[in-house]
């Protein structure tokens, strides 16, 4: 059995960044809003550290997205305006 996570940290990080930008928050503000250490959050958003389930749950609860969105990119339980904004943020070239 493989020890690699089925979730890709880089993709999770891109979705987190899109969600954060949609809400107009800095990394520090977003991290504080979900009680995650700012340095750890930065590493998660950059895809350097996996997103733990307890952190994902806090993000999902606070920002109105599903765990499926965070881990798999599924937009089925995300409000349509948020889904449109997230897709726009995810498809823009990264600076």
Image: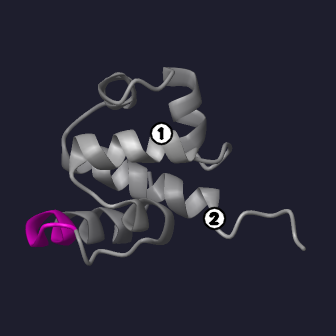
In the image, residue 5 lies in the stretch drawn in magenta? no
Image location (x, y in percent) of residue 39: 56, 23
* Local secondary structure at mark 1: helix
Q: Secondary structure at mark 2?
A: loop
Q: Residue at x 26, y 64 (%)?
A: 86
Magenta stretch in the rendered image: 78-84
| Residue for badge 2 | 8
Image position, residue 5 (x, y; %): 72, 63
Q: Residue at x 60, y 58 (%)?
A: 10
Q: Residues within 10 Å of mark 1 (few under 14, many from 20)?
A: some
Furthest residue in direction left, as rendered: 81
Disc number at residue 3? none
Marks 1 & 2, CB-CB < 8 Å contact? no
Neighbor class of circle 2 (other Cα within 10 Å; few <14, some 14-19, many 20+) is some
The kind of secondary structure the magenta stretch mainly shows is helix
Q: Which residue is mark 1?
A: 55
């Amino acid at each position: 059995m493989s020890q690699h996570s089925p979730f890709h940290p880089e993709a999770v990080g891109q979705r987190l960044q899109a969600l954060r930008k949609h809400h107009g928050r800095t990394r520090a503000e977003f991290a504080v809003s979900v009680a995650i250490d700012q340095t750890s959050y930065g590493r998660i958003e950059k895809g350097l550290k996996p997103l733990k389930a307890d952190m994902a749950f806090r993000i999902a609860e606070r920002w109105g997205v599903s765990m499926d969105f965070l881990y798999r990119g599924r937009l089925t339980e995300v409000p349509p305006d948020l889904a449109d904004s997230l897709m726009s943020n995810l498809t823009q070239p990264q600076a």
